[in-house]
Image (cartoon, rainbow, N blue to C red):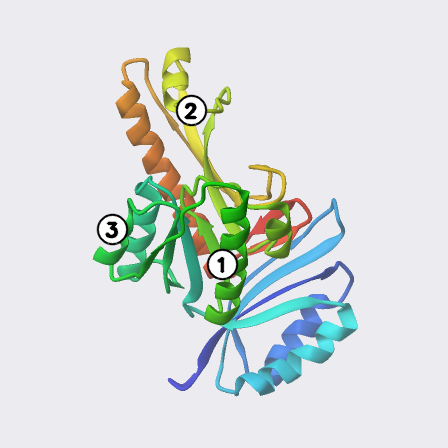
Amino acid sequence: MTTANTHWVLTLVCKDQPGIVHAISGAIVAANGNITESSQFTSDDTGRFFMRLQIESAVPREHFENQIAPVAERYGMTWELDEVGRKMKTLVLVSKSAHCLNDILFRQRAGQLPVELPAVFGNHSDLQGLAEFYGIPFEVHPITGDTDKRAFENMLRTYIKTAGIELIVLARYMQVLSEEFCKEFEGKIINIHHSFLPGFKGANPYAQAHARGVKLIGATAHFVTADLDEGPIIEQNVVRVEHSDSKKRLVSIGQDVESKTLTQAVRWFAERRVLLDGERTIIFS
């Protein structure tokens, strides 16, 4: 291998059938490629085949795609080719809670998260200083009713197109997106919410959990769908807590696990490690 090589990531999904791995490997060899990482999975539930490959090759992208395309057509594949480590253009939406945004901004600046953040949008101005501390433009878009929400989503559609946004992250964004918007960007919006056993909804969930003596708290990162908090799950974490933990301590623990869980989900998505299988996700971690 020479230093002129490009490191590619190839993901593909198709109906499971004989010869897929052999055919795709042959196309990679024809493109003078060397496979450096390989993961595959067949879903018994849907009969679909999933694969993620990292490949080094010195040939131009067009030549690489020309080798893959006939194989993809033969097997009816949905596939994507990207450069390993390319920073994915990501828009973050926030309200007032800072913990998830702070973790994303810190890890992005530290080079631990392969995303590019052109802006942060908030329906309140509380986190403007935090975003600007990291050098990220912050826009305030207040929402007080349906008219504001429709106007915001229309503006958001235009921004996503013009800025080339590939991922939208709801970092404790406390507004419900419309069903139309969720469907339009299905598989491109990631949300985070707490996970209590049993579940507590409404105001002050940590106070409710403390009152009930909850022993496990956690967080779930998932794709956004029209069904609130019921989209395909990307990542989950849980932490054990004790009866001696105060409400304030529960909040702190919960915020830590939310931040960790959301950031991991964003990282996997940006690294092309998340593939959808209906209402489930396939994670090539």
| Cα–Cα span, label 3 and label 1 | 21 Å
Q: Nearer the viewer, residue 210 or 235?
A: 210
Looking at the rendered image, the quarter that the N terminus falls into is bottom left
Q: What residue type is labelled 2?
A: Ala
Which of 24/220 is in front? Answer: 220
* Tag 2 secondary structure: loop
For disc 2, the marked residue is 203
Residue 247 x %, y %: 30, 20
> Residue 55's spot in the image, x, y percent?
51, 73
Q: Earlier in the sequence, mark 2 or mark 1?
A: 1
Q: Mark 3 vs mark 2: which is more N-terminal?
A: 3
Amino acid carrying mark 1 in the image:
Leu
| Category of crowding for the residue at label 2, using alpha-carbon neighbours closer than 10 angstroms: few (below 14), some (14–19), many (at least 20) | few
| Image quarter of residue 98 | top left
Which residue is the site of mark 1?
A: 167
Q: Which of marks 2 and 1 is in front?
A: 2
In this rendering, position of residue 189 left or right of residue 122: right
**Residue occupying the far front of the picture:** 147
Left or right of 63: which side holds 14? Answer: right
Position above or below: 209 against 158 = above
Residue at horizontal 48%, vertical 55%?
168
Residue count near mark 1 (Cα–Cα under 10 Å), binned few <14, some 14–19, many ≥20: many
The residue located at (48%, 86%) in the rendering is 58
- Nearest the camera: 94 or 112? 94
Camera-nearest residue between 285 and 157: 157
Q: Distance between the residues labelled 3 and 2?
A: 25 Å
Q: Vertically, is 21 above or below 230?
A: below
Q: Report how many numbered discs are placed on residues in the image.
A: 3
Residue 125 in picture, x, y percent from top left: 30, 47
- Give me the disc on residue 130: 3
Tell me whether the residue at label 3 lies in contact with that at label 2, contact meaning CB atoms closer than 8 angstroms.
no
